Amino acid sequence: MRRKRGCGVSEEKVTEEKQSVLDGFKAFLMRGNVIDLAVAVVIGAAFTAVVNSIVKGLINPIVGAFGTKDLEKYRSCLKAPCETNAAGEVVHGIPILWGAVLSAVLTFLITAAVVYFLMVLPMSRYLARKAAREAKAEEEQAAVEAAEITLLREIRDELVAQRSGSSA
């Protein structure tokens, strides 16, 4: 006799449910999408460091030629005067940190441009060429099949003509 848990579910059924959940999870992990996503996250994390270094090492100095070297330091004060302590924390006033927003927007635009020009555009061109090759191959196959059908019809008509000629 099976022992039952307090909730009225047999241990065997609970084991089967755990096993099916584990099997489902294993199937989920083994799908290509999850692995592709994991690779994309790792590459994205590494790429973020590259973009940040471009913004800090290239963009910020260019902006620095017109003002401060660090975009993060560009700010306006909504409620004057804005006062900061030695650690750079605002102790009085309401600052608007538009330099940080500008830096984030530049980082986003650089990332988007690199992703588009180095990944999306080449892949779309590759897929377009592949689709064109496949369409051409399908057209050639259709032409071959049409020629075969025409030849088979001629053979059929010839056989019908021979059969009609021998029976008459």
Image (spheres, helix red, strand yellow):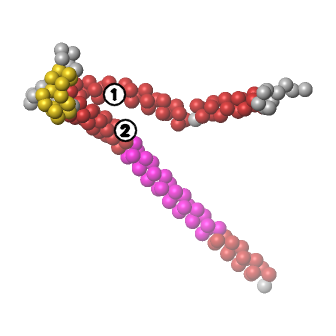
Q: Which mark is residue 119?
A: 2
- Residue extending farthest to the left is 66
Q: What amino acid is found at the position of numbered circle 1 in the picture?
A: Thr
Q: Residue at x 47, y 56 (%)?
A: 136
User: Residue 159's x, y, as percent?
Assistant: 71, 73
Q: Is residue 35 magenta?
A: no
Report the residue marked by disc 1: 48
Mark 2–mark 1 Cα distance, whole angstroms, equals 15 Å
- Residue extending farthest to the bottom is 168
What residue range appears in magenta? 123-152
Query: Does residue 113 appear in the picture of this structure?
Result: yes
Quarter holding the N terminus is: top right
* For residue 88, above or below residue 128: above
Q: Identify the main secondary structure in magenta.
A: helix
Q: Quadrant of residue 66?
A: top left
Mark 2 or 1: in front is: 1
For label 2, the SS is: helix
Q: What amino acid is found at the position of numbered circle 2 in the picture?
A: Met
